[in-house]
Image: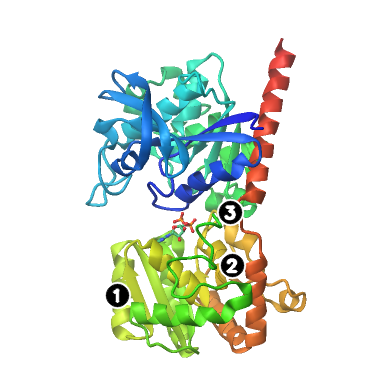
Amino acid sequence: MKDIKVLSVASEIFPLVKTGGLADVAGALPGALAGEGVAMRSLVPGYPGVLGGLAKSDVVHRFADLFGGPAQLLAGKGAGLDLFVLDAPHLFARYGHPYTATNGIDWSDNPARFAALSRAGASVGQGLVPGFVPDIVHCHDWPTGLTPAYLAYDGGPRPGTVMTIHNLAFQGQFPASLLASLGLPPDSFTVEGVEYYGSIGYLKAGLRLADRITTVSPTYAAEIRTPEWGMGLDGLLKTRAADMAGILNGIDLSVWNPAGDAHLAARFDARRLAARARNKAALQDRMGLAVEPASLLFGVITRLFWQKGLDLLLAALPTLLQEGGQLALLGAGDKPIEDDFHAAVAAYPGRIAFTRGYDEGLAHLIQGGADSIIVPSRFEPCGLTQLCALRYGAVPLVARVGGLADTIIDANEAGVAAATATGVQFAPVTADMLDAALRRTAALYRDQPTWKRLQLNGMKTDVSWQGPARHYAALYRDLIAARRARSGSQR
Ligand code: ADP
């Protein structure tokens, strides 16, 4: 029996709209939580892709004017998910990227767009839809950070609130002059409220005002309470340490299943690892690499931004090549990084390949065909590609930060001796240390029995949503109990 109702509010949800891991989490959690007695419904913006994916919907509320235009709240199923969709054409009827125009610049009305989403989330939390009055509203990242603020400043009964940080680098900071237009009272503009260094901080507001805070790995939860990685919020997060938890992400094992993956040239599992060779050949061929079965083929699937440490990889390319390696890179992002990799492809044809863009199918083939997946991030809240890599027998080579530190067991002497190692870690995150890690990975690859052990250990690792879902369910129950106890003691 599902005894807890949770509204998840998110600006992305897989498979309807996705720019990163946040969408994967928002898309996978409801299904995983169903087995834990939690009925989760998700509120998302009515982008064209979301409205197009709605099978059948009912209008459950009409807003005469929501931040500059009429809007309606739809309820229905989309891609198997129980959705509330905020159909506000003046804010969300835009194709392409959810946050930026085609020129890559943020939409100037993002403050209103995501205040509207947050406002709708708060209203559903307050009982706007009588058939679904949630016990908890669970908010994801800055676009939903004002939800706890609206709930706090509206007064009256409210559900419990949880704010999850998927990436502290995106904070949603907007001019103080917008305060009234956002429907926030003047007394909300304090350090204890939405004020953040003289501006309005959406994420800051959520972190200040939500009952609980989670982030997506225990190590990242600790890192962001330090000035080095707190990005201005470490002080606040330190004061809220008692209300904070790090809960790792999982991956959807029905989407990431090498034994039944239609994107692969050959499907495989732990007993049929040899079949990976066909994927490797298919990947090399598709990306224009020399089709060499024995070369150590590295894969990288990522957004191309500073966070992801691709400049370190560029600096370490000579070592990768010296060790007889090849590189298959899939990603898009900052133009200078893209240009550098295009230049590397031109300099080392057949050894380095770069597909610019977002390609779900190719991402699967890289996971199923590459020998190793490199994740050289400077910081990484959880990281998903290394979890997929574990599942697909591609040995992860990762920076020892955030969720990468928490999910990969290093193949040092102890890890190999204990037969628990699943990959290679390096720290600190510098080009020199990446260099050394590439050499270490190449040595491990030359020792095929050990390599195979790493692959099999990885494939055995539980990367499902089951464990994380249990954690979230326990957190919701704990919060509900704590709020009941508090309201009881106030009587
Ligand atoms: P982030 O959320 O910071 O981008 P994560 O590793 O947490 O990083 O999640 C990234 C997700 O997006 C993974 O599921 C990864 O496979 C996917 N992804 C990233 N870039 C691409 C791309 N260019 N093509 C296909 N999938 C991608």
Residue at disc 1, secondary structure: helix
Q: Nearer the viewer, mark 2 or mark 1?
A: 2
Which one is in front, 284 or 31? 31
**Which residue extends farthest top?**
491
Which one is in front, 445 or 190? 445
Q: Amino acid at mark 2?
A: Leu
Q: Residues within 10 Å of mark 3 (few under 14, many from 20)?
A: many
**Residue 477, how many percent across, how many down?**
68, 32
On screen, 152 above or below 173?
Answer: above
Query: Going by the image, does 457 lie left or right of 173?
Result: right
**Residue 264, how many percent across, how many down?**
45, 71
Is disc 2 in contact with disc 3, using a CB cutoff of under 8 Å? no
Q: Which residue is mark 2?
A: 390
On screen, 311 above or below 256?
Answer: below
Q: Which residue is mark 3?
A: 250
**Residue 353, how many percent across, how many down?**
35, 78
Q: Nearer the viewer, mark 1 or mark 3?
A: 3
Q: Amino acid at mark 1?
A: His
Give me the residue at 28% from left, 71% from top.
339
Give me the residue at 30% from left, 25% from top.
71
Q: Residues within 10 Å of mark 1 (few under 14, many from 20)?
A: some
Q: Amino acid at mark 3?
A: Gly
Q: Is tag 1's residue or tag 3's residue first in the polypeptide sequence?
A: 3
Give me the residue at 45% from left, 22% from top.
123
Distance, label 2 to label 1, CA atoms, is: 28 Å
Give me the residue at 66% from left, 85% from top.
449
Residue at disc 2, secondary structure: helix
Total marks in image: 3
Q: Is residue 258 visible?
A: yes
Residue at disc 3, secondary structure: loop
Q: Which residue is mark 1?
A: 342
